[in-house]
Amino acid sequence: MTNRHSATIAIYALLLVAALAAPLFLYPQFVMRAYCFALFACAFNLLLGYVGLLSFGHAAFFGFAAYVTGHTVKMWGLGPEAGILLGAASAAVLGLVFGGIAIRRQGIYFAMITLALAQMLYFFCLQAPFTHGEDGIQSIPRGYLFGVLDLNDSLTMYYFVLVVFILGFLVIQRTIHSPFGQILKAIRENEPRAVSLGYNTDRYKLQAFVISAALSGVAGGVFALTFQIATLNNVHWHLSGEVVLMTLLGGMGTVLGPVVGAFLVAAIQQYLAAYGAWVSIFQGIIFVACVLLFRRGIVGEIIHYTRPRTRAQKELEAAGVPVEGAAGQSV
Amino acid sequence: MIQSLLGIPPQVLFGQLMLGLINGAFYAMLSLGLALIFGMLNIINFAHGALYMMGAFAAYLLLENFGINYWLALIIAPIVVGAFGMIIERLMLKPLYKLDHLYGLLLTFGLALILEGVFRDLYGVSGIPYTVPPQLTGGWNLGFMFLPIYRGWVVIASLIICIATWLLIEKTKLGSYLRAATENPQLVQAFGINVPAMITLTYGLGVGLAAIAGVLAAPIYSVNPLMGSNLIIVVFAVVVIGGMGSILGSVVTGFMLGLVEGLTKVFYPEASSTVIFVIMAIVLLIKPAGLFGRAH
């Protein structure tokens, strides 16, 4: 185990160095976009991977927070940190309402309800005056962080986005590994049993939903500041599908999976953008391939094949018995 | 002769109600297919909207390439698209039955993206007009409103299709096998009935219904690669409101919600695109299992 533990630390150290040095090699706009998506996907994974709830309307929280951040920063003249916090707060309130309605049904209905509620919000944003309809909120000022740091400088902005992403990531880590997170996993594994143990599972599910919505809101707010625009694209069901794709591709229920998935999906968008409809064809193919061929996702499969196994487990596997409970907790 | 109802000219009111009824006809046919598929496969077919779009495109392509008219398309399109659906069921959905239902949703979502993307790449997003067949052009003046014949036909045709499907499921031997296999597939298989074939057939039937709806829709809305994706989300809400327990339930809910949407367009147009979602939220708060659903 110590071996494995130090390997984990080494991976994180390498990733941190890569993240700090990334602007030297990669286009900062691309990496910042990927960080926003990565935080969004990690927040989404908190629900799908750890509570087993598939929300098909998560763009509502991302996109609505982007609008709120954009509006408060541009029209009310708030600082970027206040704008992001207000965006996240509004996403949390929205999450409380949507979550409160959606958790009344389970499984597949939950997915359909969240999708429908998000579509309702989409039509609301299409008509509401403050979102400026098809135009969106444009030229949102980045402003000065805490009144001091000039975010118009692209490197400053880059490191700000990186810090927000890491903070969000740590919050999710803390949530997963807390007693609260253990209860969430218990609900995922066997909800009736969690109920019989005396847990009010609806309350835990709703809390997880609100946390996930709020963090998606942080991602949306940062996105609006980074690209200085908040549009209908951010509340569209397409983005809801993309965040599912990021999580599925990277590996749901793994810590780093959504991050890997987010970078890959962002790269697909970047490099296939010129081919129009091919972005969605390609994304569709990845969906189908993930479901049919590697349901654990990239990180999930790596963990599965590198995890330490006892001799008994190996013999079971050789005999063709599936061994469960392998979804990695350490990476 | 009524001059106005609550300050609304009757032509406007009945015109919108008619449009609502047409939307309701599509909701009914699509939610019926979704319910059939869900009952048998335990999969929510996210590709349903894309297959409906394919039905419309099949009608257009049959006319363009082979000169096959609307009436024949109404028969050929569902067969072709239904067969396509059955191939997909055999190749892709079959391995998923033992897994969590969510994988079926994810896979069919991916399929919807692929199908939509392919048609978008080939035909763009501007939409292609499909002319109303000559037998159904023109309209009747009913005194209180002008009724285009084609719109009346769509409502009647969809009612016939829904009732025929209901009869097939409830009154025929095949239907009774289907219902039995939905309840307990192992037992039915033990009686020597080929359940996997029934499953494939059910998927083909549901997809065929979507394709017929697509052909019916082609002359009203233009043939467009994106015509299915927004519709399917509304149909999901319809399915949540009605519950997927009963066939008649989904048909009634479909038509009813179409009418409500039409009325909203008359009295409060700003809410017409969201009213169904609001109703869904209210129903979930009052009766989470849906109007016709069974609590479990």
Image (tube, rainbow, N blue to C red):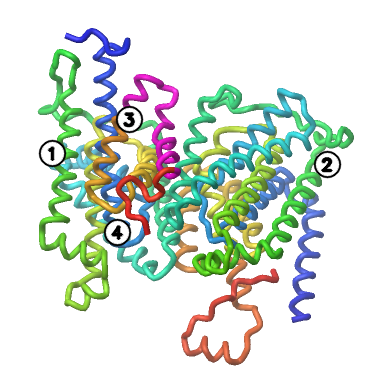
- Residues marked 2 and 3, same chain: no
Q: Which residues are magenta?
A: B262-285
Question: Which of pointers 4 and 2 indicates the residue nearer the eye?
Answer: 4
Q: In which quadrant is the C terminus of chain A drawn? A: bottom right
Residue A264 percent coordinates (x, y): 61, 55
Q: In which quadrant is the N terminus of chain A drawn? A: bottom right
Residue B73 percent coordinates (x, y): 17, 42
Secondary element at image label 2: helix
Q: Is residue B170 above or below residue B234?
A: below
User: What secondary structure is the stretch in magenta mostly built from?
Assistant: helix
Find the distance from the CA under tag 1 to the CA under tag 2: 65 Å
Label 3: few (<14), some or many (≥20) within 10 Å? some
Residue denoted by label 4: B39
Asked if the residues shown at circle 3 and circle 1 are in contact, with their CB atoms under 8 angstroms apart, the answer is no
Residue denoted by label 3: B260
Find the distance from the CA under tag 4 to the CA under tag 2: 55 Å
Label 1 resides on the chain identified as B
Asked if the residues shown at circle 4 and circle 2 are in contact, with their CB atoms under 8 angstroms apart, the answer is no
Label 3 resides on the chain identified as B
Label 4: few (<14), some or many (≥20) within 10 Å? many
Residue at horizontal 62 percent and vertical 67 percent from the top: A299
Name the image quarter holding residue B192. bottom left
Secondary element at image label 1: helix
Find the distance from the CA under tag 4 to the CA under tag 3: 27 Å
- Residues marked 4 and 2, same chain: no
Inspect the magenta stretch and tell me whether residue B272 lies in it. Answer: yes
In this view of the protein, which residue sits in the foreground, B288 or A227? B288
Which disc is residue A156 wearing?
2
Which disc is residue B71 wearing?
1
